[in-house]
Image: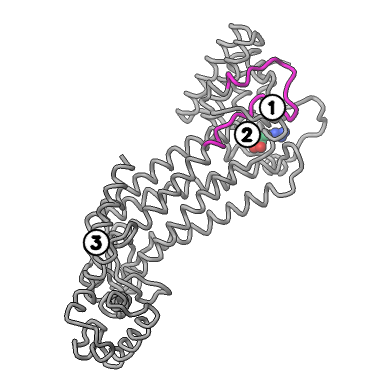
Amino acid sequence: MSDNQLANKSQAWSALFSEPMSDLVKRYTASVGFDQRLWRADIAGSLAHAEMLAAQGILNAEDHAAIQRGLGEIAAEIEAGQFEWKLDLEDVHLNIEARLTERVGIAGKRLHTGRSRNDQVATDVRLWLRGEIDEISGLLKALQTVMVEKASEHADVILPGFTHLQVAQPVSFGHHLLAYVEMFARDAERMGDTRKRVNRLPLGAAALAGTSYPLDRERVAKTLGMEGVCQNSLDAVSDRDFAIEFSSAATLVMLHISRLSEELILWMSQNFGFIALPDAFCTGSSIMPQKKNPDVPELARGKTGRVVGHLVGLVTLMKGQPLAYNKDNQEDKEPLFDTVDTLKDTLRIFADMLAGLTVKPEAMRAAALKGHATATDLADYLVKKGVAFRDAHEVVAHAVKTATAKGVDLAALSLDELKAFDARIEADVFEVLSLEGSLNARNVLGGTAPAQVRAQVARHRARLV
Ligand code: ARG
């Protein structure tokens, strides 16, 4: 069979098959429609494999040169949008290999020596994912940087902190933002951990059992910048735990984004009025002219469901699969690709949106003055005067009840009124009952005192350079 015949024949693997595939089955089994995005990784993997074959004397220098040249030309073709992807050739791997043979002849047919698509695809996905993890880590860093700067600007802005969505204690808005920075910092750490296990080489496992050629797998790993070689061929071609691990790290990022989204949506509503988002991230209503809707955070909250769904999909895909490679694994790609796309877009858009966030300190302050937010401070004040905390808690509960009945905040009661609950209360109590007093009192590591917030800002800045 001529090289051209090989490239054009509809089934790339063998003469064993006498019946052609129906168009429906072809479409059903092909992955080229989506896995073509792995082309860079596929070519990088092939180049590294060919280089090692040549170094080991399995491929002669002439064939090696032809393969290098051919793959370079194919890369240029794909880049220029001139590559013709063929459904008949099933996937990215067979498409590129067939084109290589078309271009360089018999040398192209030698590339697959000691290799199977099973170890090839596992390698490609890992290489591709490694690059995406690096991009995502950069985006997480950029988002954190924006949030740290906003926190620095608003270290002294006070809003009510909530538990059960009830006013609990006043906190610094900067402190609130830094809570998310902590989450995103852990997310970045998780991405880094995941990367270590993604960055291992399956090539050389061949179909499932390893290969009879004297391959130098360590050499290929080194060429590809991988941290190690998968040590068991059956495991190397079959497990997708690295994809699941990434997907779960991505899910956590989106969970954090969804929590932040929920808060932005609440804060932007008329009932809170704590913030405004830039117009470019909101939409109007086709019927209600007064509306400005926080579409971006709402969509991010919604898209979190989709990323969670992909995680569940991948976990379910892997469950119960016997060793070694099964075609089921072709289904790992679309969820993984969509997870990466969704995550990257979301991180980019959040960094831009938060950079343009407008804060309304007066509204935050008014809300913080509403729910007896400094009640704990009064209890702590009494403790410092010798009252046992449980008793102090009880005294303050009575005071809150009275203030509520009067329709005022605890801090608005007069000294005489307060003294009626405990004679040890004196004029200095009002310092404690003020929002600023409450914040400043929490000058403990990790606390909300503006001084602590500024110290955290400095720590994050140093970490994020
Ligand atoms: N397109 C396949 C995938 O994504 C490549 C591996 C195919 N291997 C095989 N033995 N059919 O998993």
The image quadrant that residue 102 belongs to is top right
Which disc number belongs to residue 358?
A: 3
Q: In the image shown, does 309 or 384 lie closer to the viewer?
A: 384
Please indicate, yes or no, whether residue 337 appears anywhere in the rendered image.
yes
Q: Secondary structure at mark 3?
A: strand
Q: Amino acid at mark 1?
A: Ala
Q: Earlier in the sequence, mark 2 or mark 1?
A: 2
Q: Position of residue 298 (x, y in %)?
A: 42, 63
Q: Amino acid at mark 3?
A: Thr
Do residues under tags 3 and 2 come within 8 Å of each other at their CB atoms? no
Q: With respect to residue 109, does 385 lie above or below?
A: below
Which residue, given by chain and number where applicable, does mark 1 sit on? 205
Residue at x 72% of width, y 33% of height: 234
Q: Position of residue 289 (x, y in %)?
A: 29, 72
Residue at x 81% of width, y 30% of height: 17
Which residue, given by chain and number where applicable, does mark 2 sit on? 122
Relative to 213, 107 lies left or right = left
Q: Amino acid at mark 2?
A: Ala
Residues shaded magenta: 196-220
Of all residues, the one furthest to the front in this rendering is: 386
Query: CB at mark 3 closer than 8 A to ligand 1?
Result: no
